[in-house]
Image (spheres, rainbow, N blue to C red):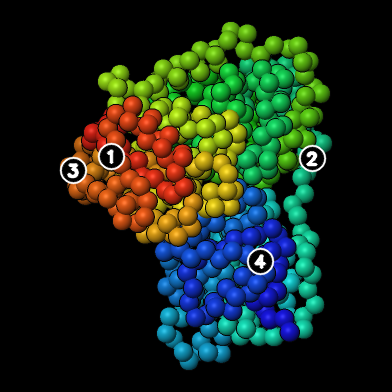
Amino acid sequence: MTTGADIIAGKLYAAGCRHAFGIPGGEVLALMQSLDQAGMNFVLVKHENAGGFMAEGGWHADGAPGVLLATIGPGAANAINVIANAWQDRVPLVFLTGCVDQGEAESYTHQVFDHQQLLRPIVKASFSARLGALDVVMEKALAIALDGQPGPVHIDVPIKVAEGETDEAWSKTFRSFPVATAPARGSDLETALALFAKAERPIAIAGVDAVNEGASEAISAFCKKFGIPLVTSYKGKGLLDENHPLALGGAGLSPKADGHLLPLINKSDCILLLGYDPIEMRINWRNPWDADAPVVDVTPVLRTHGMHGVSATLRSAIAPVLDILSEARDVNHASWQDKEPETVRRDLDEAFAPEGEGWGPGTVFHTLRKAMPANTVATADSGAHRILVSQIWRCPQARQMLQSSALCTMGCAVPLAMGHRLVDGEAPVIAFVGDAGLEMCLGELSTLRDLKIPVIICVLVDTSLALIELKQRGSQRPNVGVDFGETDFPAVARAYGGHGVWIDNADDLKQETQAALDRNGFTVLACRISRRAYDGAF
């Protein structure tokens, strides 16, 4: 006889899910068993937060929604940060929580609180599983998680539902899939066509929605055909090979980069927003152009952010819009005849060059980009290092730099790298993390050990919350609560069964990186940099 947990697991498997991450409790044992029997690999982690980021890393690798499992009470509460991240960073994450049955909850209070009430502000939907309606609930949950801007959905699963036998008819396929749409005919489309047809200086800005739509090929072809420079958000890096002359790199957090990019954007006579969600962007990107600027917004969802104005909004998938725009413009109509985007690209290269003294975070990132294979997937934790590496690290393809760029949470880089490597199994991965960020998730090094997967962790050791210290100093506040002692990360790596080494020069970094690429287990490259090494860097 089929149990409720069997249907839940079967529907996840039908949607392509092959891994689930989490920490067990008595209330989810039936779910764990069914996930395993359905053919899904359950990965034991040390904290639910890390489990959610591993699930996201896996989604970037194979396109299936991530699955996070947590037990009642403290398990559900531990996951709040990664659920909020999935909400803001547009990650399809199915969050399964165990709970006591409703009747029990009326008189049994141990570890019991309303999971749904807690989670509703940060999920696209929250469901309470019921026998007899599990097929439809799972169809709804998966469709909502993937539709439009992807995001997390929560399913609270009472013990009796998970363990209970049912004769409910259910389909072992997932029937609901998002459908790409074309723009509706109307004044906004006519405005967009007129702007693009006559533009002398068109420019495009692309972001997370373009990545999630898989629009890289369409955007690359369009930009190359018409000579259109492309700026991306950090999540959009690689939508156009960043080694291409038209690629102006990522933007959104670096005032130094903004100083070059925003003036160029404001000289454009046709700004194309291609799946660009400004949730990743800081204050410089609030009203970055005049209210009457010639801006066309191609978006899968209603934009209510209020960050900027547009001339025309096209609710559509990106590729159909680019096809229509292409028909409106002569392919021989040259763009940017003054070659100013080329100048900006050269200026950006100079602005983010390695340190003249031969060592520092910029040198670390440039050295590693040259040493690592082109197909490397990099992840970046929040902090000063993330802003700098996001400007320096060039991605040939989309989804080759993973980070929390909307919620901007610490503790994400290492589990993101772990999840991607576990699911993909081929592309090299490297996690860039500050010393404080690595200390947040040191326990997951034991997960790395047990999984036996090769992950390179580059930790920038400056014994300070560098970005916050920089802001503290910039606002003329005293140094409070941002500095700490040095951890012997190589020793910690060895204690967890990996390899670790201190590095303080580029030659050693090259040598140790090659050794790490040849190693089966994980490696911690502990790069000592001076305090205030990021001053003026970004």
Residue for badge 4: 39
Q: Nearer the viewer, residue 364 or 109?
A: 364
Image location (x, y in percent) of residue 223? 67, 23
Q: Nearer the viewer, residue 464 or 324?
A: 464
Residue 267 higher or lower than 177, as above or below: above
Distance, label 2 to label 3, CA atoms, is 54 Å
Judged from the image, the secondary structure of the residue bearing numbered disc 4 is loop
Image point (74%, 30%), residue name? 322
Residue for badge 2: 182
Image location (x, y in percent) of residue 52? 50, 59
Q: Nearer the viewer, residue 324 or 465?
A: 465
First reached walking from the N terminus: tag 2 or tag 3: 2
First reached walking from the N terminus: tag 4 or tag 3: 4
Which three-letter amino acid code belongs to the residue tagged 2?
A: Ala
Image point (42%, 85%), residue name? 110
Residue 250 higher or lower than 126, as above or below: above
